[in-house]
Amino acid sequence: MSERVRITDVAPRDGLQNEPGRVATRDKASLVRLLIRSGVDEIEVSSFVSPKWIPQLGDAGELLAMLAGDKPAGMVFSALVPNERGLDAALAVNERAGARLIDKVSVFTAASETFSEKNTNATIAQTIERFRPVIARANGAGLRVRGYVSCVIACPFEGEIPPARVADVSARLLDLGIDELDLGDTIGQGAPDSIEAMLIDVLERTNLAPSTRDGDPSLTLHLHDTFGRASSYVERALELGVRSFDGAAGGLGGCPYASTAQRRAPGNIATEALVDVVTASGYTTGVDLDALREAASFARTLSAPTEPTPGDAP
Ligand code: HMG
Ligand code: MG
């Protein structure tokens, strides 16, 4: 029997956080419901970040309240929390729902100091200190914690990032007690060889076993697909034992703080392309591709067309 690969769809969060226009909360709820029907393992529903920084996701609490009756057993809902204030908001959602609507919270930092400052107004060390109480309290409340490291291959401001720096930040997050490390190629600059070199350094330094245990992942890869090459990184990562990936239905997305004057932040690997490559590589997922394509078509209607930017060609 083929081995199962875990799929998280981040379209409602990463996919919509960089939209120039406002997406109605009821449309976000419709997207999440379509993703539920597609059978993905996890949906990153939104972010409890400052609405001054990311106004597009300022309706996180309202959106989750709308979805209270829709979450099937076994489905994981997650949300980003940058600090204790964000965690408080996530815990309040569960309290109001009288159930665990949010199962997992995600803290996020970077392997690049400049990106960290631009994204969270804090150095990497300051973000780690912020996470200490967040992780302890989230674990105490029975929530799993994902820890994102951005810019694991390159930074839009600093250029190439050495794998040792990614390994160092990863080790610090794992020491704090995160359950899952999520490595982000934020601007899609990887190649199969650079992804492999980075993964080998991280796995050696952290002693992390990359596979999933009891369905819960210890390591996830989060790829943005600037040059349409992300599928080849997935193939290589599968060879190295990675069994959990993020994608965004329709290939939406990008972190606004990864945009530069020359280039708008690139979208995530489309979840439908991700499932295709995982399946073609001989693994299974729980995803119904027809239902996922329906979610992807709907997701694309929520997103403004992106203007091609100079230098976007491979
Ligand atoms: P700051 O300005 O340094 O913080 O922002 P502050 O403590 O001075 O707060 C500023 C204001 O925000 C205050 O409001 C706070 O109360 C409020 P005021 O008093 O001025 O009215 N505030 C909050 N409001 C709601 N929820 C909160 C919260 N915290 C403070 N949790 C902060 C620091 C971290 C808050 C800010 O920088 C922030 O929210 N950044 C979020 C950036 C973000 O969401 N980026 C995108 C996600 S990361 C990503 O996309 C990469 C990823 O996909 C992986 C990859 O691709 O690599 C994950
Ligand atoms: Mg991202």
Image (spheres, helix red, strand yellow):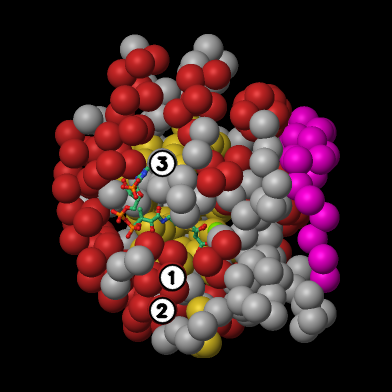
Residues tagged 1 and 2 counted as in contact (Cβ below 8 A):
yes
Label located before the other in sequence (3 or 1): 3
Residue 23 position within the rendered picture, expressed as x and y whole percent measured from the top left: 68, 38
Q: Is mark 3 within 8 Å of ligand 1?
A: yes
Q: Quadrant of ligand 2?
A: bottom right
| The magenta stretch spans residue 312 | no
Give coordinates of residue 41: x percent, y percent: 55, 35
- Name the residue at 53% across, 12% down: 69
Q: Could one spot residue 227 in this view of the protein?
A: yes
Q: Where, quadrant-wise, is the C terminus in this rendering?
A: bottom right
Relative to 57, 120 lies left or right: left
Location of mark 1 (residue): 118
Examine the rendered structure and indicate whether residue 292 appears above or below residue 278: above
Give the SS element for disc 1: helix
Say left or right for 259 vs 299.
left
Q: Could you say which is closer to the camera, residue 83 or residue 245?
A: 83
**Of the residues under marks 2 and 3, which one precedes in the sequence?**
3
Query: Residues under labels 3 and 1: Cα distance?
Result: 18 Å
Q: Which residue is mark 3?
A: 48
User: Residue at left 76%, top 47%?
Assistant: 303
- Residue 229 vs 120, above or below: the answer is below
Kindly identify the amino acid type of the residue bearing the numbered disc 3.
Phe
Q: Are marks 2 and 3 in contact (CB under 8 Å)?
A: no
The residue sitting at 82% across, 66% down in the picture is 307
Crowd around label 1: few <14 · some 14–19 · many ≥20 (10 Å): some
- Compared to 225, does 261 lie above or below? below
Q: Position of residue 104 (x, y in %)?
A: 38, 37
- Name which quarter of the figure residue 233 lies in: bottom right
User: Disc 2 to disc 3, how far (Cα)?
Assistant: 22 Å
Q: Is residue 303 magenta?
A: yes
The residue stretch that appears in magenta: 288-308
Quadrant housing residue 36: top right
